[in-house]
Image: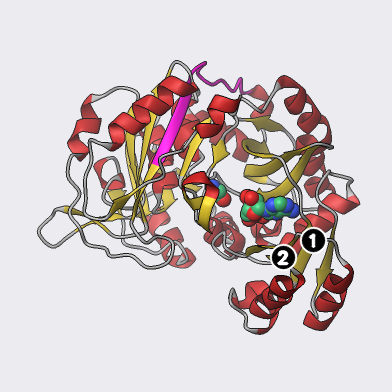
Amino acid sequence: MKVLVVGSGGREHAIVTSVAKSSRVDKIYCAPGNAGIAGLAECVPINAMEFDKLAAFAKEKEIDFTIVGMDDPLVGGIVDVFEAEGLKVFGPKKNAAILEGSKAFSKDLMKKYKIPTAAYETFDDPKKAVAYLETAKLPIVLKADGLALGKGVLICNTLEEAKAGVKEIMEDKKFGAAGNYMVIEEFMTGREVSVLSFVDGKTIQIMSSAQDHKRAKDGDQGLNTGGMGTFSPSPFYTAEVDAFCKKYIYQPTVDAMAAEGRPFTGVIFFGLMLTEDGPKVLEYNARFGDPEAQVVLPRMKNDIIDVMEACVDGKLDTIDLQFEENAAVCVVLASDGYPVAYEKGYEITGLEKFEKQDGYYCFHAGTKFDDAGKIVTSGGRVLGVTAKGADLKEARANAYAATEWVNFENKYMRHDIGKAIDEA
Ligand code: AMP
Ligand code: GLY
């Protein structure tokens, strides 16, 4: 069969890598893709937000199955456009992708269906938000309602910071229309875990857990980024936590969406905080995590097309989802200066070493071919170096060893990805 993957980052490279392993797939296209994806798929220069062009392409090439990796097109309704054209597509419809697209929606859903999350209030008026802050306990968390590239969350330690945050989000519109509404919520403490799941509208199956490192610098210092590295599984995601989440979070979320007339098909990403009072939902995403996909998918034993097709067909209960009994660590190689300002266009060397090593992956995020056909840096996050190991410590050692195989000017990485493993 012919498969189209929509997106261009490390997550989509991981998805394409899994699709390429499927015995059912003869040809993969990726729109728009990147220089690494081009090794496995034919990259098509159509932007992920050009739904009509993408659907026309899928019809012309007789694509059997489309997988949407990114949040923006999902929240924008790409799945509805494909389905209206009779095309088979993996991902939530617009009315379900709102689970990620609006924090006010997801918080209200959790409140209505008693799914554990931080206490909160929603505001559409900055004056009311400030009045609320005057009496609120600190620290406090401000969230722009809509999509903001993972940057619309402000953790404020003082009232002044919080007031400035309201101004940034709601008045200066730093995150655009995402700031028309705002959620102000209670600050929680605990370990964070990312749990990805496959959902077919009614059934949910959980993938192996992971943990991300969102801050730019070692010791969780510096600005929030798209993610600087991950490990899977999380040793803090115990059987007890899993049982609690299955009962109070996962299935209740899927049932709530169905009850609201918004059945969810695709991947739900649960961002969880393991608090003293038990696991609570930090956020939902309507897609695989990036770079969570880069440590979870390489460990999945199933044929990814079988699983995704079962989701679209409403038959996920027939799938026996299985993961390898090992571990994986991903270290992101970024351009120095990310997430603020950085230079691009530097040649990347050493990539060929990954082709010969089982259990090692170099997922491209911000790369492209220059005019001379060389692979060069083209983004803040450039590569995600993933390695497997028998356990987390071995996987971490392998991943850090492999970060030395590739080089480019301004290469930057955190050196403490997976440090929490030592505390488990
Ligand atoms: P989100 O985009 O909602 O996942 O938020 C980004 C990051 O902000 C999370 O990964 C947490 O580290 C942090 N965060 C979000 N909400 C809270 C909260 N209520 N309490 C503490 N930290 C939070
Ligand atoms: N790694 C966090 C995310 O994909 O949202």
**Residue 85 visible to the viewer:** no
Give the percent coordinates (x, y) of residue 176: 59, 77
Direction from residue 262 to residue 302 in the image, left or right: left
What secondary structure is marked by label 1? loop
The quarter holding residue 16 reads: top left
Query: Which-is-in-front pick, marks 2 and 1?
Result: 1
Name the residue beneath numbered marker 2: 142
- Residue name at image x 35 percent, y 32 percent: 400
The dominant secondary structure in magenta is loop
Q: Residues within 10 Å of mark 1 (few under 14, many from 20)?
A: some
- Residue 154 is left or right of residue 289, and the answer is right
Residue at x-position 34% and y-position 59% = 379
Residue 306 pos. (x, y %): 52, 29
* Residue shown at the point (81%, 48%) measured from the top left: 117
Front position in the image: 237 or 410:
410
Magenta residues, as a range? 319-331
C-alpha gap between disc 2 and disc 1: 11 Å
Callout 2: helix, strand or loop? strand
Q: Is residue 77 visible?
A: yes
**Circle 1 is placed at which residue position?**
138
